[in-house]
Image (tube, rainbow, N blue to C red):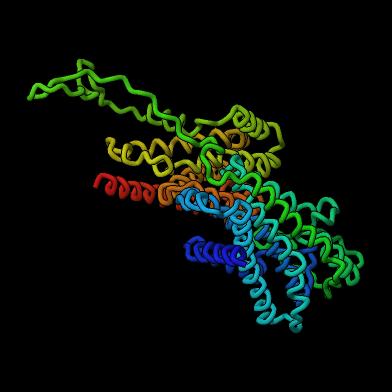
Amino acid sequence: MDRLNILCQLVLADFRERTRRYSFLLTLLATLFFSYLVVTGKYTLRLGEYRGEYNSAWVGSLMGIASTIMLFLFGFYLVKNSLSRDRSTGVGQILATTLLSNSAYVTTKFISNFIILGFMAAILAAAAVVMQWISPAAAGLDLWALLAPFLFFCLPVLPLVAAMAVLFESVQWLRGTMGNILYLVIAEAAMMNSLVVDIPLLDFNGLGIFIPSMQDAARAVYPEARLGVEIGFVGFIDNPAAGTLKLFHWDGIAWSLGMVPLRLLWIAAALGLTGLATACFDRFDPARTGRAEPAPPASPPLPAQEDSGGRSRPAPPWSGDAAVEFDFSFLRMWKAELRLMLKGCHWSWYAIAFGLLAAQFALPYGYARAFALPAAWIWPLSIWSSMGTREARFNTGPILFSSAHPVSRQLPAAWVAGLTIALLAGSGMLLRAAWGGEAAHLKALLVGALFVPTLALALGTASGTRKLFEMSYLLIWYLGPVNRLVPLDFPGVTHAAAAGTIPLIYLAISLVLLPAASLVRQRQVALGRG
C-alpha cells in the first residue's frame, strides 16, 4: 500500500509540474484552436463532393478521428520531455540514489503521459459537445453517438503514444532529433494505413470502419456518386467542389462490445512498450550512456617569468616574440560555424542528403516539388536546431560573450551557415525553378530558405534548447509542405501559396525574427559580461 501511495504521489507531482509550465498553456490553446478549425470546417472529412449532415454521429466521428490523428501525431512531442527534464535538471540523478525501482519510475512517467493526453482528449470531446449544441444545422444531441468514437478509438490509442514517448526517451539514440523524425514517419504511416491497406489491428483512427459506412450512406442517396476521401485541412486548399458539397444523412456506427478486445490489444502493446522502456532505461548513469566526459589533455607548461619580488610565475599565453593577429575574416568565421554544424554527421547522413538532392533533379517537377523538397528540408533538422543553442548546451557562453563583437560577427556567421545548408538542401528545386521560368516558385523557395535558419536562430537563441525549434518546425513542415495547408506552406509546394502573398508574409516574419535574435543575444552578452 505504501508503494502504491508513493507511485500516486510521483504521478501527481509530475502532473502538477507539467501543467504549471507555459508550454502546457500553449498546448492547451493550440488544442482549442484545433477544435475551432474543426468547428469552422477548415479541418474536415469529405467523400469527394459529398459530406454528411452535421448530426451527432457525424460530428462525433469527425472530432474522434481528428482528435486521434492530432494526439497520435503531435501528442508524442507534448509528453516526450519528462525523462529529459529530470536528466537535465539533476532530479534524475537524485532519484537514482533512492530505493525507487526502474520499473516504478518508468511506470509513473507512462501514467503521467497518459493523464496529460487524456486531459487534451477530454477538451476535444467537450468541444465536440459544444459544437453540436451550438450548430444551427444540428439535428438534436445524442451523447452516445457523439462520444463513442472517443471511447473506442481516441482513448485506447493514448496509452500507445504515452508508452512510445517513454521508450524513445529511454533509448539513447532515439532521444534527440532522429527519434523525433522517426516517430513522425511511423505515426504518419500508421495513420495512412486505413486508407491504403485493411489491417484492423493497425486501424488506430477508425477510418477503416467509418469510411465504408459513410460511403454506403452516400451511395444510398446518390447511387451514381464517385466517392473519394479527403481528410485534413481541406478547407484551406483550393477545391472546386468546396462550394458545391452535397449532403447525405448518416446514422453512425453500431457500437458493440465486440470492438473492445482489439482496443485491449493496443493497451497491452502499450504496457509491453513500457516494459521495454524499463529494460532500456539507464537510470541516469553516464557510464551506461557513454556520456562521461574524458579528462582534458594536459597543456604544456608555460615559460616561467619572474615578478617584481623575484618569484617565478608562468608567462601569459600572449607573451613572447610571436605576433598576435587581430584581423577578422567573416569567411573564416562562416567556415568555422559550418564545420561546427556538420561536426558529428555520419557518412550515411551525407549519403541520404545527396540522395534527396538527386531526387530533386530526377523526379518530374511536380513530384519533386511535392515530395522531394519537403523531405530534403526536414533532413537537416538536427543541424538547424543547434543554431543559437550551443552556448547554453555546452556552457561556452562566457567564452563567446567575452570575445570581440559576438553579436555583429559570430551571430551573422551562424545565420549564414544555416542559410547555406538550406540553399544546398534545396538547390535542386532552386535550379530547376530558375531554369524552367517558375518565377513564383523560385521566389517562394528563396524565402523558405531564408525563413528556416532565421526561425532556428531566433528560437534557439531565445530558448537555449533545441526542442522549441524542432517541435515548431516539425508542426509547420507537417501541416504546410506535407499536408498542403496554404498558410503554413512556406516553400510554396502548392501553387496557391507560391503565387499568393504567403512568401511575402514569411519574408516579413524573417525580417522581424532576425533582429529579434540579435537583440536577445545582445542582452545575453550584456548579462554575461555584467
Residue 521 x, y percent position in the rendering: 34, 46
Residue 284 x, y percent position in the rendering: 53, 45
The residue most toward the bottom is: 140
Residue 508 x, y percent position in the rendering: 45, 52
Q: Which residue is at the front of the view, 239 or 251?
A: 251
From the viewer's perspective, is residue 130 above or below residue 264?
below
Residue at left offset 72%, top offset 55%? 270
From the viewer's perspective, is residue 332 above or below residue 230?
above
Residue at left offset 73%, top offset 52%? 272
Residue at left offset 7%, top offset 24%? 308
User: Looking at the figure, which quarter contains the N terminus?
Assistant: bottom right
Horizontal side of 91 relative to 308 (left or right) equals right
The count of marks equals 0
**Residue 85 shows in this picture:** no
**Residue 463 shows in this picture:** yes
Q: Which residue is at the front of the view, 152 or 88?
A: 88
From the viewer's perspective, is residue 312 above or below residue 517?
above
The residue most toward the left is: 308
Q: Quadrant of residue 378?
A: top right
Residue 281 x, y percent position in the rendering: 61, 46
Residue at left offset 63%, top offset 69%? 35
Horizontal side of 401 relative to 233 (left or right) equals left
